[in-house]
Amino acid sequence: MDLISFFTRIPFEGDLERVTKQLWALPLLSLITSALPMAILTLKIPLKEVFALLSLYYIVGLIHLDGLADFSDGVMAKGGVEDKYRAMKDVNVGIAGIFSVVVVLILQLEALKFSPFYAIFLAELNSKFSILVALLVRKPLGEGLAKFFMDRFDRRQFLIGFCIYVTLISITSIHDRRALLSSLSLIVSLVFIRLAVKSFNGLNGDCIGAIAEITRTSSLVLCAILFEIK
């Protein structure tokens, strides 16, 4: 699948034009990206949460974390839209970017300690679906891959992706109804989409990557809280 070649580090050859026609399948991709981390979390080994998180980033890569760092630098920069955009595109990572990446990694790691093994699947599912939500906004920032995808992403693809998302999260909820509540992390996605549009007048790859990371993190934290409630 071309989608695998673009959104993971799994060595598949793919065509970028075909990727744009497969964006609806992003929720399905969460089954692949979370498989190894879930398997690790079922093992009775020390530091399994650390190894699970490392395996996840080995599969998905660090490009979204890089986007989170750039996005945070831009949002936290003083000044108007142009000043924030300039800070986001600066090749040097600022303290805001470093801080946001560290916080996200710590929150994910700690949340995994209090969540069932399949919480990382739910987090990946919500994260991947948040990308579709961001693309549907259709407010590209500059010329780049985000605009390339937005120009080719339509409501039909979103509807198919939404149906897949609902199906997967509903199947998981058969085991535990609390799984449905993990979808509340998408509210966080909407908040940060609005923040990005307000700060930069649009969304680029850095913004969408940041939204994916933040959504995964908030989903894991939410699962940790929900599944600790007896």
Image (cartoon, rainbow, N blue to C red):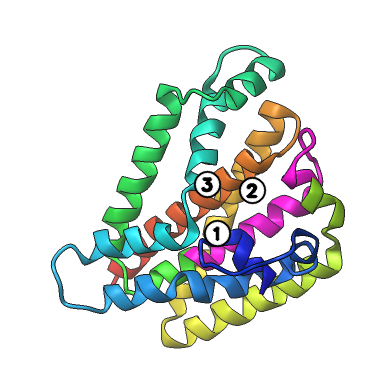
Badge 2: how crowded within 10 Å, few (<14), some, or many (20+)? Answer: some
Circle 3 packing at 10 Å, graded few (<14), some (14-19), many (20+), is: some
Quadrant of the drawing holding the N terminus: bottom right
Q: CA distance from mark 3 to mark 1?
A: 14 Å
| Between discs 1 and 2, the one toward the N terminus | 1
Crowd tier of the residue under label 1, counting other residues whose Cα lies within 10 Å: few below 14, some 14–19, many 20 or above: many
219 and 48: which one is in front?
A: 48
Asked whether the residues under the numbered discs 3 and 2 touch, taking CB atoms below 8 Å apart as contact, a structural biologist would say no
- Which residue, given by chain and number where applicable, does mark 1 sit on? 127
Quadrant of the drawing holding the C terminus? bottom left
Q: Nearer the viewer, residue 51 or 224?
A: 51
Pointer 3 residue: 63
Above or below 58: residue 44: below
Which residue is located at x 65 percent, y 55 percent?
A: 131
| Magenta-drawn stretch, dominant element (helix, strand or loop) | helix
At a point 51% along the width and 75% down the height, the residue shown is: 32
Q: Disc number at residue 7?
A: none
Question: How far is the residue under mark 1 from the one under mark 2?
Answer: 12 Å
The correct choice, above or below, for 144 with respect to 62 in the image is above
Stretch of the chain drawn in magenta: 124-147
Q: Amino acid at mark 1?
A: Ser
Residue at point 76%, 74% (across, down): 160
Residue under label 2: 190
